Amino acid sequence: MTARILLEIHIKKCGRERLRFSEVNNMKFPGGLNIQQMMKQAQQMQEQMSREMDELRVEASAGGGVVNVSMKGDHEVISLKVDPELVKENDVEMLQDMVIAAVNEANRKVNEAMKSKLGSMLPPGLGNLF
């Protein structure tokens, strides 16, 4: 994907200017900014974040470790463990609350990890935007 634009001004017989866009290699902005290079860097960052999300694993627990959840960086729950003693008590509402608490904690940890990783990839001063 490349950004190739050149602004050309054509003058009609009546003297009015008309704008037309045509393609040009590597458009550069004042200060040496190169759109094509910026797009390439953005794509590389996106690919890196995708790989890191696939590799990221977090664990969270609720009820002092009675319920444990493992989650991938894309928020997919890959493991849910419940202490058998909790099930014997037949307190379904408490079990449900603990599962929800553990899953929410895992989600929070994934979000924090991804914000941290994204912030470290951005130029200085932009990392705290998220």
Image (spheres, grey):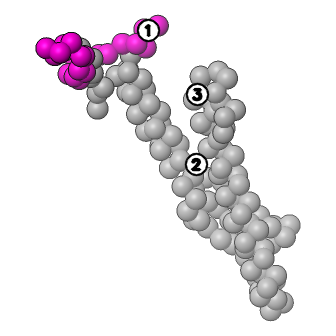
Of the residues tagged 1 and 2, which is closer to the observer? 1
Q: Could you say where residue 39 lies in the image, as x and y percent from the top left?
A: 39, 28
Front-most of 1 and 93?
A: 1
In this rendering, would 107 be left or right of 40?
Answer: right
In this rendering, would 71 be left or right of 4?
Answer: right
Query: Of helix, strand and loop, which one carries label 1?
Result: loop
**Amino acid carrying mark 2 in the image:** Leu
Q: Name the residue under label 1.
A: 30
Q: What span is in magenta?
A: 11-33
Identify the mark nearer the N-term, 3 or 1: 1
Q: Pointer 1 and pointer 2: residues touching (CB < 8 Å)?
A: no
Which quadrant of the view contains residue 126? Answer: top right
Q: Could you say where residue 64 lies in the image, as x and y percent from the top left?
A: 86, 67
Q: Determine the residue positioned at 57% across, 52% down.
A: 73
- Check disc 1: other Cα within 10 Å, few if <14, some if 14-19, many if 20+: few
Identify the mark nearer the N-term, 1 or 2: 1
As drawn, the residue found furthest toward the front would be: 14
